[in-house]
Image: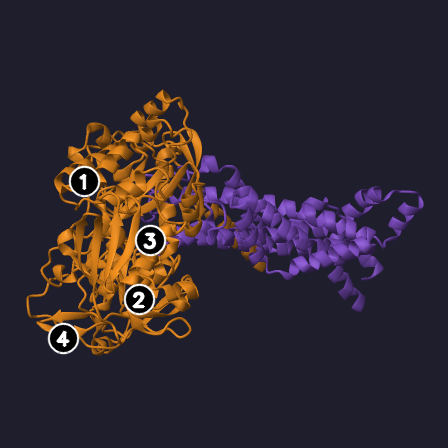
Chain colours: A orange, B purple
Amino acid sequence: MKKLIWVAIAGIVVVAMILGSCGGAKETQAPTQKPTTTATTAPTTSTTQPVPTSVTPPAPGSREVPQYGGTLRILGSSPTVDPMSFDPADWAWKVSQDTNFYFEHLLGGDLDKGPRGTNEFKFLASDWIPDNVVRGVLAESWEIQSSPLALVFRLRKGINWQAKPGVMASREFVAQDVVYSMTRLFASPKAIAAYMGGPTRWEARDKYTAVCYMDTFFANWKYAIGHGYYDIICPEEVVKAGAADWRNATGTGPYMITDYVSASSQTYTKNPNYWDKETINGKQYQLPYTDKIIVLIMKDESTRLAALRTGKVDLSMSTTWKFVDTLKQTSPELKVNKYLGTGGGMAALRMDTKPFDDIRVRRALNIGTDKVGLIQTLYNGNAELLHYPFANDWTGLFTPMDQLPKSAQELYVYDKDKAKKLLTEAGYPTGFTVKAMVSNDSAAVDWASYVAGSLAEIGVKLELIPTEYAATVSAQVTKTHPPVFFFTSSHGTPIAVLRKNFLPGQQWNPYMFDDKWFTDTYNKAIQMTDDAERNKLLKELNVYAIDQAPCIWLPTQAYFCYWWPWVKNYYGELYSGSLTWAPILTRIWMDQGMKKTMGY
Amino acid sequence: MTETAIAVTRKKTRGFLSDFFYRLVKEKPLGTFGAAVCIILLLVGIFANFLAPYGYNQLLRGEALKAPSAAHILGTDNLGRDMLSRIIYGARLSVTVAFGATSLSIVISVLIGLTTGYFGGVYDLMMQRFVDAWMAFPGLIVLIIAVSLIGAGMWQIIIVLGLQYGIAGSRIIRGSVVATKENIYISAAKSIGATGPRILYQHILPNIMAPVIILFTTRLGAVVLAEASLSFLGLGIPPPAPSWGGMLSGSGRSYMFLAPWLAIWPGLALTIVVYGVNVFGDAMRDLLDPRLRGGLGRYSGVKINRKLAKHLKQAEHE
């Protein structure tokens, strides 16, 4: 009897499984066919949802008096990526973000012109700072000398390199340090070509004056050698001890790196002799306020969310839309600021290989990708269709969708039939199969899978190759990536974004874009001293690049920056220079009493 | 058992297969469940094109993250793909990898086990030391390293898993071969001039089929789990292939709070399949155990009339 019962149970389970696996097959459709989707309507210029923000610029004189002490734990804008190098001469894009706690730049952004002060600039861009918001950091002042053509930097006096046992004793920061650092940077075999326009020569005119001689004027010099990705000042003693080893690092900055555990965290401990101060309500306060900053690395998004919700993380800069409602319910005290990503995502199409040497094929892949659908599906509407190469808040430079030429606008309108027609004209009536490399984090894989699914409907099959991020960068730099290459790239400045993406041989040019008119026009623009004329050319170059469809242009998603109420003196800013976040984090103080009262 | 009882027993013989399935259903209910799971898995994998309502990477616009409903029995994922279709195509993937890798592993195990067990000597010594070294490495680490070197893809996974389990499983086959080769009929075959390969093929191989079959069925579950583990770690079959492990690792984890069904269905599918395959393998092992052969017992195909035997026994006592 018992055996019969067991057999009966087994039978019921089997039947249930059969019903379950056959359940949806009532009206079986051919697996790869769906009712034909007609072209979408003309693309809207903005699809971003209304911006929630807890950022309220303080009334003059109302800022709280800072407290000293505590440890700030943060998840940054790249919480899954380890430091790629601690040596600026390696020209790794992340070096400024990891080292600017102790290595500083000549220039930076004036945070008092941001939300904490006059609110002229939000400090949400990853690289760009308008000229009126730039301030001197290690340089007190600067000027352009016309004959011979040079940039003259007068340095702040009384700034000291911190002592590091076995590396260097404490000493004053002088002009020779700038000369050494910059000369080494641009002499590096890894230096990016044309980064500073043409060749430069550095000289220490006196103890506190560093001069950069140029052959031709370079309009983007502030970005290249002032507040850019690589121009952090690194002393000779650290280089001799081994700049790539974080244990040898010492600088003039507000913190010192005291620990680094790969794939886990970087710890920065307060420099008690830091030179900078902050003025609050008319009184000056010594920086930094917190004793330590721990930058956490967490590959898994759910883990990051759990860490934020439980107060293990005080500030998380790049939460995605899918956790917004959950956080609203579970942690309503959290403050939030929404911002559009500081760059663009693309699927680069190698223009030096078939079939992407044919613009019709490139246009077909753009038109055959449902980008508006991608915004709705992957980002729940929290994304912008057109935000690259130029950012949509670059007033006077950005061209809105409705002002682009018709041929460029078409690239953003989904039309399967038109895409198939273009492919047929190009000689691919049945489509083709091509390999596509993508970083192996789940968000990137989803993104690429969506594009692959969209393109499958026009007969183009992408064979995705998920690859470790560092390996994708290596492939990108060595130009060994496959014909389709999914990647993201930050904006930089209007000049930098055009250089790094569209000049031949550049690291961030995986499309292998090489256009004589573009290169000639770019070289003309960067030497112009008239801002209005230069901007006109830059605008033209941007539109031209879009129209050439060197990649599948993909939307830029919005992110949410969250922080707990005990994180004080923070107004949602991200950077004051290229991935330069240390000045912002340095000004944060922790209300430890509040944190305890709240039970964390 | 008295002579009378023996005399009245009815001799009823069944074929090997029918006897096997009869005994499976009668004595091994869990094994029956496992067998049903294996059959369903095979059928779903073979007929996935007909069973799945959509393609595995078919994007259904406006249908992202829909909960299970009449329109989508298992819901949809974050890209608007039907979960039922992806689970069904995932079954095909699992079947292909499981049967492919397991078959390859059996071929390797038999080749190594048969030759080392029969020929012995220095060859056996050297090979077994190699197998020792191979088995000393943690299996998953070896798999991760191998996939990192040769890249991810279905055939790469099949080859790597086949090699991994094949070499380790050769021990079991070798043991059976060593036991079998001591039988007198092997000596008899040798004495009449049968060559080594002939003896291996004609006499030894048929007599070790039971452990081979058991090894096959027990390996299936392990291979399915290993493939899911590799996919979970991002080293398995690349997306958008609907690997159950990959579905768990990717959208399953990212959308755990928002859409728990993205993790539940692939997890449940994996659990049922691995459990079913394992219990079927256990049942196979019990039913094919040679120690239970002979006499009036299981393997003889002889049915004993137990009622009559009991009645006669009582009568004897009286």
Q: Residues within 10 Å of mark 2 (few under 14, many from 20)?
A: many
User: Which of the 4 image quadrants contains residue B260?
Assistant: bottom left
Please tell me whether mark 4 or mark 2 is closer to you in this view: 2
Residue that sits furthest to the left in the current view? A60
**Amino acid, disc 3:** Ala
* Rendered image: mark on residue A102: 2
Disc 2 is placed on an element classified as loop
**Rendered location of residue A448, percent (x, y):** 37, 42
Q: Kindly report the distance in space between the C-alpha atoms of the residues bearing marks 2 and 3.
A: 43 Å
> The disc labelled 2 sits on which kind of residue?
Tyr
Whether labels 4 and 3 belong to a single chain: the reply is: no
Q: Amino acid at mark 4?
A: Val
Above or below A300: residue B95:
above
User: Label 1 amino acid?
Assistant: Met
How far is the residue under mark 1 from the one under mark 2? 35 Å
Mark 3 or mark 1, whichever is nearer to me: 1
The lab-note entry on whether marks 2 and 3 share a chain reads no
Res B209 visible: no
Q: Residue at x 41, y 68 (%)?
A: A247
Which residue is painted at 77% across and 61% down in the image?
A: B312
Q: Quadrant of the C terminus of chain A?
A: bottom left
Classify residue A295 by image quadrant.
bottom left
- State how far apart marks 4 and 3 are (Cα): 44 Å
Instruction: Pinpoint the chain carrying mark 4.
Output: A
Labels 1, 4: one chain? yes
Crowding at label 1, few (<14), some or many (≥20) Cα neighbours within 10 Å?
A: some
Name the residue tied to disc 4: A65
Name the residue beneath numbered marker 1.
Answer: A528
Q: CA distance from mark 4 to mark 2?
A: 25 Å
